[in-house]
Amino acid sequence: MYFFVTLSKLIRLKLTLRNYLFLWINVWTMKFELIEHNFQCPYCNESISIMLDPSEKKQQYIEECEVCCNSIEITCDFVDGKLEYFNAQVAE
C-alpha cells in the first residue's frame, strides 16, 4: 500500500513532515487507508477537505476551519471501514 501526498497537499492540510511520517507509519502498520471527505464550514460556508481515520468506528473531535479558524465539532461513524454518518457543527 502506498500513501503519497504532494508538498502542496501537506501545506493545504497543514501537516508538518513529522506528522506526515507519523500518519504514513500508522497507515502502513495498521493496514487501513485514510478517507478524504469534503464538507462546508458551519461558520463561513467554505468547502473544506478533511482526512478521516476509519479504524475507529465512532469518533467525535474538534477541528479548526482552515479558512476562518473557528472550531468545528466533527462527529462521524464508520461501518466496515466505510463512512456511514458525518456531521460538522459549531463547537460549543
Image: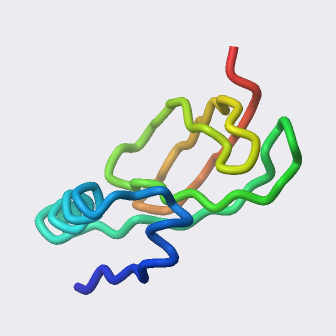
- 53 lies left or right of 49: left
Q: Nearer the viewer, residue 78 or 14?
A: 14
**Does 17 sit above or below residue 45?**
below
Q: Position of residue 1 (x, y in %)?
A: 23, 85
* Residue at 80 percent of width and 51 percent of height: 40
| Residue ranking furthest to the left | 29
Q: Position of residue 69 (x, y in %)?
A: 68, 37
- 26 lies left or right of 5: left
Q: Nearer the viewer, residue 39 or 30?
A: 39
Question: Total marks drawn?
Answer: 0
**Does 58 sit above or below residue 91?**
below
* Residue at 65 percent of width and 29 percent of height: 71
* Residue at 41 percent of width and 59 percent of height: 80
Which quarter shows the C terminus?
top right
The image's colour scheme reads rainbow
* Residue at 55 percent of width and 30 percent of height: 62
Q: Position of residue 3 (x, y in %)?
A: 30, 80
- 38 lies left or right of 8: right
| Residue ranking furthest to the right | 45
